[in-house]
Image: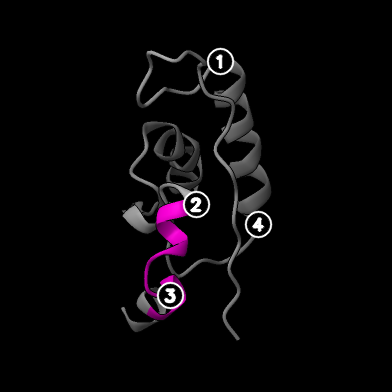
Amino acid sequence: MIQILLARHGEAAKGNSIVDPALTPLGHKQAIQLASSFSKNTYLKLVSSPKLRAQQTAKPLADKLGTSISLENRVSEIPSFIRTTPLLDTLTAE
């Protein structure tokens, strides 16, 4: 059985002029807490949106696991995810 764990990015900077905001100091703390919680599991693959805030959220977990982060455009924003082919099929085929 395949188990998929999803997490939303940590708190990101706010502002209409910021296209791809980074995590705030609180967001970085949230990412570290996420890594502590999720690192108790075994993973075949760590996937992130290409958005900076998502990659910054995934990095502490990748560091803890000693693995890399695979970037996946289809998890970038919900509307684009809904309009694409099933992500699970792609991830399990690799």
Residue behind mark 3: 86
Callout 2: SS: helix
Callout in the foreground (2, 4): 2
Q: Secondary structure at mark 1?
A: helix
The kind of residue on which mark 3 rests is Pro
Q: Are marks 4 and 3 in contact (CB under 8 Å)?
A: no
Of callouts 4 and 1, the N-terminal one: 1
Query: Disc 3 versus disc 1: distance between alpha carbons?
Result: 34 Å
Number of the front mark, 1 or 2:
2
- Spatial CA span between label 4 and label 3: 27 Å
Q: Nearer the viewer, residue 26 or 77?
A: 77
- CA neighbours of label 1 inside 10 A, class few (<14), some (14 to 19), many (20+): few
| Lower sequence index among marks 3 and 1 | 1
Q: Residue at x 31, y 78 (%)?
A: 94
User: Does the magenta-highlighted stretch encompass residue 73?
Assistant: no
Does the rendering let one see residue 65? no
**Residue contact at pointers 1 and 2, CB within 8 angstroms:** no
Residue 76: x %, y % from top left:
41, 48
Q: Quadrant of residue 3?
A: bottom right
Marks 3/2 in contact by CB < 8 Å: the verdict is no
Q: Which residues are magenta?
A: 79-89
- Amino acid marked by disc 1: Pro
Which residue is under mark 2? Answer: 78
Q: Nearer the viewer, residue 48 or 85?
A: 85
Res. 25 mark: 1
Q: Earlier in the sequence, mark 4 or mark 3?
A: 4
